[in-house]
Amino acid sequence: MSDPGPVLSSGARYRDELVARGLLLATGVDGLYGFSNDLVRLIAAVETYVSAAGAGKYEVLRFPPVVPRVVLERSGYVRSFPDLVGAVRTFTGGDEAHHALLRTLDAGGDWTAGLGGSDVALCAAACQPLYPTITPDLPVGGRRFDVCGYVFRHEPSSDVARMLSFRQYEYVYAGDELGALAHRDHWTEVAAEMLSDLGLDVAATLASDPFFGRAGRALTATQREGALKYEVVAATAPDAPTTAITSANCHLDHFCRELGIRTAAGETAHSSCVGFGLERIAFALLFAHGPNLAGWPDRARARLAV
Ligand code: ZN
């Protein structure tokens, strides 16, 4: 009798189906994939669609996927999400340490134990490296930014919508409290309309972040009670709960207080952002309309020009 192999979750089965169709290229690590020609085109089309929604109204800035480590420290990310953090370690030893590292490598051991910490870490949210670059005195009306880039979250999963490395397209506001709330509310509504217009069955729901540990549970409750975060959710795989494909989050004065950013009136500024998950939107579209882009509904194809 042949070995039936391990029983796969439905998420893993669906992921394997996308690999078998050639849309995803497996790397051997859950949550890390290469993308096929069709998927690259689709994600680029989603990016163009999202960027058109804010064109001309935002300062366009871009940052690398690796950020100064202090960015993660000052943003509170290490405190709130230590389980998701990725910091970069590098080799700085001499010949002796190198030989020791190679002995470990050749023996199949953990050679990374021979590396030391560095000044840099993997970006965890596209807006994270932005805040320290904002001048402390904001103009009347605040400032609006367009940022997009790769982020890292260490949550290995066979669910294609939960990757280790993915792109976020964000519109960010820094200014007064009412402006930050208005930005969040505007984009929650606009994002739901934009995604629905692509033929996705979406819902905007109140959400909260998975802050770590016992202290984190209180933060999660505060965030939910304050109705600070909304998500636009859609199905991205069969037999799975819906996934946030866009989220809009009001940070109150969390980032601006730490960095001393003030409104034109001299008060501590507030900020908010909306983040579109480019790959997640692409996966929601593939699930809703099928893997063959040429067979998609005309409206979705026209909106995305695919
Ligand atoms: Zn953000």
Image (cartoon, rainbow, N blue to C red):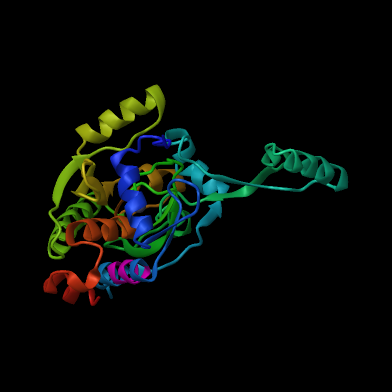
Direction right: furthest residue:
96
Could you tell me which quadrant the C terminus lies in?
bottom left
Instruction: Classify 201 as above or below 99.
Output: below
Magenta-highlighted residues: 40-46
In-front residue for pair 218/232? 232
Q: How many marks?
A: 0
Q: Residue at x 35, y 35 (%)?
A: 7
In-front residue for pair 137/258? 258
Q: Position of residue 218 (x, y in %)?
A: 32, 25
Residue 245: in magenta span? no
Instruction: Classify 50 as above or below 9.
Output: below
Instruction: Classify 108 as above or below 182.
Output: above
Observer able to see residue 252: no
Direction top: furthest residue:
214
Specify the quadrant of the image occupied by residue 226: top left
In-front residue for pair 274/23? 23
Q: Residue at x 46, y 42 (%)?
A: 154
106 left or right, relative to 296: right
Instruction: Classify 112 as above or below 217.
Output: below
The secondary structure that most of the magenta stretch takes on is helix
